[in-house]
Image (cartoon, helix red, strand yellow):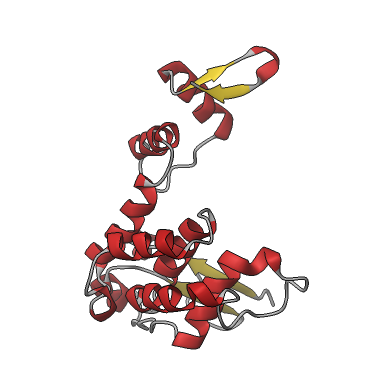
């Protein structure tokens, strides 16, 4: 008997799931299928919804600090449960509170801070820019604030290149070499001899 485990990620239309479901066996012996959707109504129609809970404060800290300080640990398997830098501990806790246990928010903020100097004032600048009241209501609009702040922190040429990706349809497979050629054609980056690419 064939056994398999399938994850169908980010279903945005129930008709798509119904088409996929037609190709699957009628019995559920020997396989497991998990579907994900950010639309609760579709999740219910696809077979029942399990709403993910936010991470607990302990796991939030581990995820946050591992992303920022992980490479500094001698043993990469060692979990970092508190801020290694005492000066940044308070602002780290405030930022984590704003992220409200949402993994995407935590990773986004941590990735942004990992590129910054270990300076308390700079970290507070990030904290103050994101907005207030997010710890009580981590909805889509608040998530957008965190992501857009990360976007505007990028260098100008990277912002242009990233924005260009929005011309492709959702779930479209983008060929890397073709994309770079398009960026060169648009003048976003410059191609020099021997295939070396650099920005203007």
Residue 134 pos. (x, y %): 26, 73
Q: Position of residue 123 (x, y in %)?
A: 42, 63
Identify the image quadrant of residue 75: bottom right
Reply above or below: 83 against 188.
below
- Going 48% across and 79% down the picture, which residue do you hit? 60
How many numbered badges does the structure rendering display? 0
In the image, farthest residue toward the top: 193
Q: Is residue 188 left or right of residue 196?
A: left
Q: Position of residue 180 (x, y in %)?
A: 53, 27
**Residue drawn where x is 23% and y is 77% of the image:** 137
Q: Residue furthest right?
A: 74
Q: In this orientation, does residue 9 appear?
A: no
Locate residue 36: give its quadrant. bottom left
Name which residue lies at 57% across and 65% down.
68
x, y percent for residue 37? 35, 68
| Residue 31 visible in rendering | yes
Please determine whether, in this image, residue 25 is positioned above or below residue 112.
below
User: Which quadrant holds the N terminus?
Assistant: bottom right
Q: Nearer the viewer, residue 102 or 126?
A: 126
Return the residue nearer the eye: 2 or 78.
78
Residue 12 vs 76, above or below: the answer is: above
Q: Is residue 80 left or right of residue 164?
A: right
């Amino acid at each position: 008997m064939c056994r398999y485990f399938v994850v169908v990620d980010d279903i945005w239309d129930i008709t798509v799931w119904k088409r996929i479901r037609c190709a699957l066996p009628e019995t559920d012996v020997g396989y497991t299928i998990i579907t994900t959707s950010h639309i609760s109504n579709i999740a219910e129609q696809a077979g029942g919804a399990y709403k993910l809970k936010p991470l607990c404060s302990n796991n939030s800290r581990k995820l946050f600090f591992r992303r920022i300080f992980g490479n500094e640990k001698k043993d990469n398997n060692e979990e970092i449960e508190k801020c290694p830098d005492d000066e940044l501990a308070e602002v780290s806790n405030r930022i984590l509170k704003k992220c409200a246990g949402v993994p995407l928010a935590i990773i986004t903020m941590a990735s942004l801070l990992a590129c910054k100097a270990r300076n308390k004032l700079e970290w507070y600048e990030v904290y103050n820019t994101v907005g207030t009241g997010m710890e009580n209501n981590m909805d889509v609009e608040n998530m957008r604030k965190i992501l857009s702040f990360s976007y505007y922190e990028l260098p100008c040429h990277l912002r242009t290149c990233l924005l260009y990706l929005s011309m492709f349809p959702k779930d479209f497979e983008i060929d890397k070499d073709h994309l770079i050629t398009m960026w060169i054609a648009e003048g976003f980056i410059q191609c020099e001899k021997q295939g070396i690419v650099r920005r203007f």
